[in-house]
Amino acid sequence: MAAASLIMDAVEVHAEGEAGRVITNGADFVQGSTMAERFEYCRTHLDHIRRLLIREPRGYPGMCAVFLLPPISDEADFGIVVLEQAGFTPMSGSNTICTVTAVIEAGLLPAVEPVTQVTLETAVGLVRVDAEVRNGKVLSVTIRNVPAFVVGLDVPLEVEGFGTVPADIVFGGQFYAQVDAASLGLELHPSNGKELVRAGALIKLAALEQAPVEHPLNPEINHVNLVMLHSGAHLPGKQARNTVVSPAEGIRIDDPRSWTGALDRSPCGTGTSGRMAALHARGELRLDEEFRHKGILDTEFVGKLVGTTEIGGRPAVLPTIRGRGWVTGTARWTLDPTDPFPDGYTVGDIWGPETE
């Protein structure tokens, strides 16, 4: 067997259904003296590794991954960069749950019972996490996320095939366009997956063109990355539901074949954080009020806003998210130098059209 040109060690985890591949030797690949520099290095130099890890034959359309890195800040235990189908992202709630579950259950961080405290460093700040642990098993993970804020409520987007669609443009760890699914004539059900993904791709295209954004602390984070379709106003006794669409790479308004992507299998942590920021701005969610948010598989994250702050002069809220993760295995992923697919591959039966 030929010697591998690339070796990636992983703990495989899922958080409420969303698969997260935690690459424990991420320091072998990522460079930079700050997390912002590391994030930009990944985007500039490591996209081939992102594709290799999460596309076929090693991955599938719903796969995510994390580079686990040594910390830069003395306050942090690890740094993380998240790999998703649409690119690298600075923060992800489900992938944070996967990461914390992995480092504790794999023994990379000593388990302290009943609560192990973990601090992760991201391109948008420190994320502090409490893991409930019993007999070495992580029972739940509570994330104190980075500040979430609203860019605009009911921003009118002209969306192909849907007309004018009001969208909340929010940040919860990455930028989202969030839309009431009912306003699109869609029901949040797994059987409607293709229609939900198509709508999400078209909303993202509209948001990229019509809703410019820029993170006040890291201007490299400067576009709407994901789309959340949700169950509308937060009312007493009404179950809040959502699905988050991660559109395929290379979506184009002139190519309907590209209007595809994958649904987040979890209730989405950064999306829930952004959703809570919008609900608070509307007066529909109080500080310290529990927000139970179900995803497309009926699994649940429990959110709460524990305070307010400012970020770059903009009002913001401090969200927490609680969810569960399960280790599904360990793996050593390799690339043989003779492999004809060094970036992995996609096929149009389940993926969008191939991009350059």
Image (cartoon, helix red, strand yellow):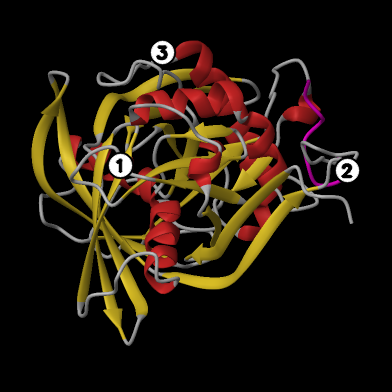
Quadrant in the rendering for residue 70: top left
Residue at x-position 51% and y-position 17%: 208
Q: Is 65 situated left or right of 290 in this image?
A: right
> Which segment did they paint magenta?
348-356
The one nearer the camera, 156 or 302, is 302
Q: Is 232 situated left or right of 330 in this image?
A: left
**Camera-nearest label, 2 or 1:** 2
Q: Can you give x and y, in whole percent of width and height, for residue 167 in the image?
A: 41, 28
Residue 62 visible: no
Name which of mark 3 and mark 2 comes first in the sequence: 3
Q: Can you give x and y, in whole percent of width and height, for residue 343 in the image?
A: 77, 36
Residue at which label 3 appears: 212
| Amino acid type at image mark 2 | Asp
- The correct choice, above or below, for 50 with respect to 7 in the image is above
Residue at which label 2 appears: 339
Residue at x-position 65% and y-position 24%: 161
For disc 2, the neighbor class at 10 Å (few under 14, some 14 to 19, many from 20) is few
Q: Is 122 situated left or right of 337 in this image?
A: left
| Amino acid type at image mark 1 | Glu
Q: Can you give x and y, in whole percent of width and height, for residue 265 in the image?
A: 55, 57
Residue at x-position 53% and y-position 65%: 13
Quadrant in the rendering for residue 258: top right
Which element type, helix, strand or loop, lies under badge 3? loop
Q: Can you give x and y, in whole percent of width and height, for residue 308 in the image?
A: 9, 39
Query: What is the number of the mark on residue 121?
Result: 1
Residues under labels 1 and 3: Cα distance?
A: 26 Å
Prevalent SS, magenta region: loop
The one nearer the camera, 58 or 232, is 58
Residues under labels 3 and 2: Cα distance?
A: 40 Å
